[in-house]
Amino acid sequence: MIKIKLLLASLLGFAGLYAQSYIPVTNEYFAFSTGEKEVFKTTFNQVSLAEAEGAFKDYLKNYKSKIEPVKGISNEYQIAEVLLSDINQAKTAMFVKFTELEGNASIYIHYLNNGKIVSKGNTPNEFDGYTKFTEAIADKSVFSAFESLIKTQSIKVKAKEKELNSIEKDEVKEHDAIGKAKKSIKDSKVMISTLEGQYKNQQSMLASKQKQVGDKQSEIASVDIKTLDGQINDLEKENKSFVKDLEKAREESAKISGEKAVLNVTLETQNKAIKAQKDLLAVTGDKKAMKEVQSMEKDAAILIGEIEEKKGEIAIKAAAARTAQEKIDAYNIQIVSIQKKIASHSENALKDQLKLLEKDLKDLENEADKIVKDTSKENDNVTKEEEGIRQSEAEIQRLKEAQIMKKSEISEATEVLNDLASEQAKFK
């Protein structure tokens, strides 16, 4: 008589997402290579022959039994004797056959207990025990099939977590890029301010040099000693003004240099404090310490900006001092030159002087052109970095959305993994 034992837990548990299961163990007859025998049979759903066969061999290791494959017959085995102490103390022989249809394996087991065929009629007391033993083999097979699914799903979860980590790193890179771009813009604006000051001074020097060239041309055309004396007086008056400008520029430059030195000392102290805080953070991992480090680094960045501004101011003052000194030197040269003219007027000497002035004028014009080009270059950099910031901000938004999606994928994949583990546990 064929007995059907319903495995309600299996049927209900796998009616949904996961179909790895087996039908209840039944009793029927099956043709082995040695003839037809009464067997305990179960058929799996989504468990392959290889998985079922491997689980069977692995499970029988617990009983230290020797599994002998039947020569010339695939997937058929014999076990001469095995002690199934949970059932009885007698020796049991087993004939086992595995088949597969459309990827679903079936297992057929013929048991002999002390030479008697195990069946409901022959061995009523042990029948349920052998049924449970067969179910245990089936449970092991399904458990192993789930193990493969869990491994694959775990790899998927780890891959998605790695993708999320990569996206998060990309966002950090974009934030870093924005920080660098903002610093570059700030540096360019400081440089533009410096260049504008230099250009203004250069234009003033150009105007002065152009005047000198015109004056020299007039002098060549007509030399008047009285006029020359008047020119000397005018130049000396101008020099006094330039000397004042020079002294003022040097004093202001010295003052700014002192302020810059104080900022450098403050920055050095701040950097030491940041290092000490980071060393503490490396030991404690305290979030509060991390916020303090970030705050201190922002203060340090502000100090660096202030130092750069001071450098720009010093450069402007230095340029003003150079301009004043150049004017003083130029006027002194003119005074000497006029004095020489008065002492000994020479047409050739005047023409040579004119050539020198024209060369100086050309040099000043070239320098002015260079300042204009440098200013244009810095303005272009500001435009480029601002566009870079806009692109980084857009990319950050995209990366944040990608993180949300990836976290959702991880959550779903993890839920699937947990479900697999939960379903697997039913067959443990």
Image (cartoon, rainbow, N blue to C red):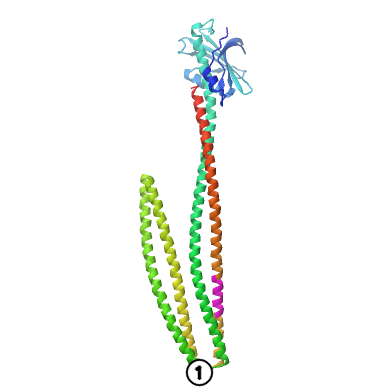
Image quadrant where one finds the N terminus: top right
How far across and down, in percent of the image, does residue 395 sit?
A: 55, 49
> Closer to the camera, 284 or 106?
284
> Closer to the camera, 35 or 15?
15
How far across and down, in percent of the image, does residue 231 sit?
A: 49, 89
How far across and down, in percent of the image, does residue 247 sit?
A: 40, 77
How far across and down, in percent of the image, does residue 240 sit?
A: 42, 83
Chief SS of the magenta region? helix
Residue at image mark 1? 225
Residue 322 appears anywhere in the view: yes
Q: Is residue 332 above or below residue 279?
A: below
Q: Is residue 191 above or below residue 28?
A: below
Q: Residue furthest top?
A: 121
Q: Residue at x 54, y 64 (%)?
A: 379
Q: Is residue 362 magenta?
A: yes
Horizontally, residue 80 falls left or right of residue 304, namely right
Residue 344 appears anywhere in the view: no
What is the tally of numbered marks visible in this picture? 1
Q: Residue at x 56, y 56 (%)?
A: 387
Q: Residue at x 51, y 69 (%)?
A: 195
Magenta residue span: 361-371
Query: Given the image, on which type of amino acid does mark 1 rest?
Result: Ile
Residue 409, by quadrant, is: top right
Q: Is residue 180 magenta?
A: no
Q: How dense is the environment of label 1, judged by Cα within 10 Å: few (below 14), some, or many (20 and up)?
A: some
SS at mark 1? helix
